[in-house]
Image (cartoon, coloured by chain):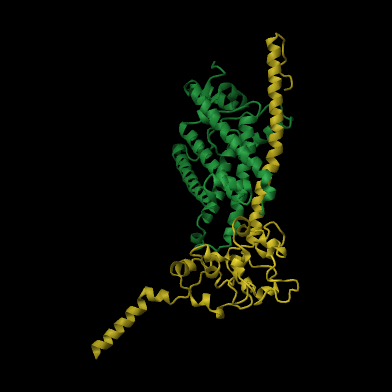
Chain colours: A yellow, B green
């Protein structure tokens, strides 16, 4: 009896000081690296990533903006239809066989459409086309990586799937709200690149003219000297 | 008195090798990068076809990028071995060093004055003029920006384990803008300043044979010449003129690269309005 009590106490003490068990009980605080530890390596997802309970069902478009000091995408206005099961419900001139780009003219201006053969319906799927924030949409962030991205990008994770296929125009003022990091990053680069040429193109042009003029003057002086003329060295070049 | 047509050693063979490697990799990255950027145009498809389609083009681009970054690391190691540690950090600001000194900023304004005709004489440049220092460090900041974003985009699936996927939206734009800046700068300003100015036209082989004529130095780097004469090192730095065959190769290679650069520049501008983004 006494031996078994000692054994139980010993085990309890061992368990309580064991670092492995202690960390396993910690809740993860940081978002960074979570996918590398779970989803990317095993393909399994934590409950919080797959169950609707942990998401605010109708606010998933904004959900991404929370991380990374709010500089990522997800800000600005979100279309009401993007939450419906049929995004085109009530659109009078909509026909299922209509070319998507005939209305969504801006949506085709992206690398996926321009440089590859991916079509709209490969990702947005068939009739009725659900809004991307609708819970059962294949493009809903909780399954987008598996249902859509991974068809081409093998091994795509939910983290990977936060890439914006339909990115806003980086230079547009509205992008400062929608995707601040893109807006400021691209503007800074554009100013650096533009600045270099605004300074150097006129500078180098004038330089070329000046250089040619100086050489011409030097050649003239040399020629005159060869002909035996006396040249004032201080003559303007 | 040394003859004006004699060449003085300006670049060591290691430095010339670095520059040669940079040319090859830069041009390879330019062609493959432009092929992908212009892939929706027939010109871009044609460029990509040279490498066997866009997937192979991107693979060549990725590998060339890695080699270039390795060269960058090599350059840093090379610099560390070249620093005179006995006089560190003062040796960093030597006249032979590429580090910016206050004198370079002053020289820039004097040179700008000369360019617009206000100042009569060009600045008393030592071994490196301000634009040569600018060109050298431009490769540094360019490579850091293109290199970091390039590594992020190398394998997006892998990168997404360490950063959110929307970072690739930014990385792609930054990579592209910096690359366009670098190409446009090399194909216009660098080529013009180093080869097309009347005093160096049609071709300056200094970076290829490593030597610069005394006449050219007197014209463009008078302080360096005076310093070498004062220290009595001028005679020992004389390099022989390379054989004619080598000179033809330098000229041919140089102009092939210049024409390739201008080809990319002109066709890039012609086709830019066909791009969706």
Q: Residue at x 72, y 19 (%)?
A: A234
| Residue A200: % across, % down | 68, 39
Going by the image, does B211 lie left or right of A19? right
The C terminus of chain B sits in image quarter: bottom right
Q: Residue at x 63, y 37 (%)?
A: B262
* B168 to B38, vertically: above or below: below
| Residue B151: % across, % down | 51, 53
Residue A185 sits in which quadrant? bottom right
The N terminus of chain B sits in image quarter: top right
| Residue B20: % across, % down | 50, 36
Which one is in front, B79 or B41?
B41
* B22 to A121, vertically: above or below: above
Residue B255 sits in which quadrant? top right
Total numbered labels: 0
Examine the rendering and report whether any part of residue B138 can be seen: yes
* A224 to B277, vertically: above or below: above
Which residue lies most toward the front here?
A: A97
| Residue A31: % across, % down | 52, 69
Examine the rendering and report whether any part of residue B141 can be seen: no
């Amino acid at each position: 009896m006494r031996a078994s009590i000692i054994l139980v106490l010993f085990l309890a003490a061992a368990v309580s000081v064991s670092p492995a068990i202690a960390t396993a009980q910690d809740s993860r605080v940081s978002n960074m690296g979570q996918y590398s530890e779970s989803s990317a390596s095993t393909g399994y997802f934590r409950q919080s990533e797959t169950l609707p309970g942990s998401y605010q069902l109708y606010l998933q478009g904004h959900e991404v903006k929370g991380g990374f000091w709010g500089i990522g995408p997800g800000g600005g206005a979100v279309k009401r239809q993007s939450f419906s099961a049929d995004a085109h419900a009530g659109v009078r001139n909509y026909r299922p066989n209509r070319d998507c780009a005939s209305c969504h003219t801006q949506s085709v201006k992206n690398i996926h459409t321009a440089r590859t053969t991916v079509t709209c319906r490969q990702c947005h799927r068939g009739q009725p086309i659900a809004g991307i924030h609708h819970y059962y949409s294949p493009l809903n962030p909780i399954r987008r990586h598996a249902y859509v991205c991974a068809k081409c990008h093998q091994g795509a994770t939910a983290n990977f799937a936060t890439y914006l296929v339909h990115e806003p125009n980086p230079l547009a003022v509205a992008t400062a709200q929608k995707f601040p990091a893109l807006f400021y990053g691209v503007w800074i680069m554009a100013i650096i690149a533009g600045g270099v040429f605004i300074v150097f193109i006129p500078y180098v042009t004038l330089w070329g003219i000046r250089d040619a003029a100086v050489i011409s003057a030097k050649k003239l002086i040399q020629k005159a000297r060869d002909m035996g003329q006396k040249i004032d060295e201080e003559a303007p070049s | 008195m040394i003859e004006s047509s004699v060449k003085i050693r300006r670049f060591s063979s290691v430095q010339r090798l670095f520059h040669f490697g940079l040319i090859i990799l830069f041009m390879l990255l330019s062609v493959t990068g432009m092929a992908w950027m212009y892939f929706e145009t027939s010109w871009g498809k044609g460029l990509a076809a040279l490498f066997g389609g866009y997937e192979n083009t991107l693979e060549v681009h990725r590998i060339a990028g890695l080699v270039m970054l390795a060269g960058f690391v090599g350059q840093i190691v090379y610099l560390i071995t070249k620093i005179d540690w006995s006089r560190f950090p003062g040796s960093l600001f030597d006249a032979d060093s590429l580090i910016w000194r206050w004198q370079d900023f002053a020289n820039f304004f004097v040179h700008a004055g000369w360019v617009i005709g206000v100042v009569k004489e060009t600045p008393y440049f030592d071994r490196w003029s301000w634009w040569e220092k600018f060109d050298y460090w431009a490769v540094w900041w360019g490579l850091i920006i293109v290199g970091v974003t390039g590594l992020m985009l190398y394998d997006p699936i892998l990168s997404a384990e360490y950063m959110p996927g929307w970072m690739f939206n930014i990385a792609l734009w930054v990579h592209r803008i910096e690359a366009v800046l670098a190409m446009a700068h090399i194909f216009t300003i660098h080529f013009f300043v180093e080869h097309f100015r009347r005093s160096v036209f049609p071709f300056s082989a200094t970076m290829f044979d490593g030597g610069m004529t005394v006449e050219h130095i007197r014209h463009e780097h008078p302080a360096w010449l005076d310093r070498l004469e004062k220290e009595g090192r001028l005679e020992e730095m004389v390099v022989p003129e390379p054989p004619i065959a080598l000179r033809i190769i330098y000229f041919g290679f140089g102009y092939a690269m210049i024409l390739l650069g201008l080809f990319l520049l002109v066709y890039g501008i012609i086709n830019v309005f066909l791009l969706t983004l």
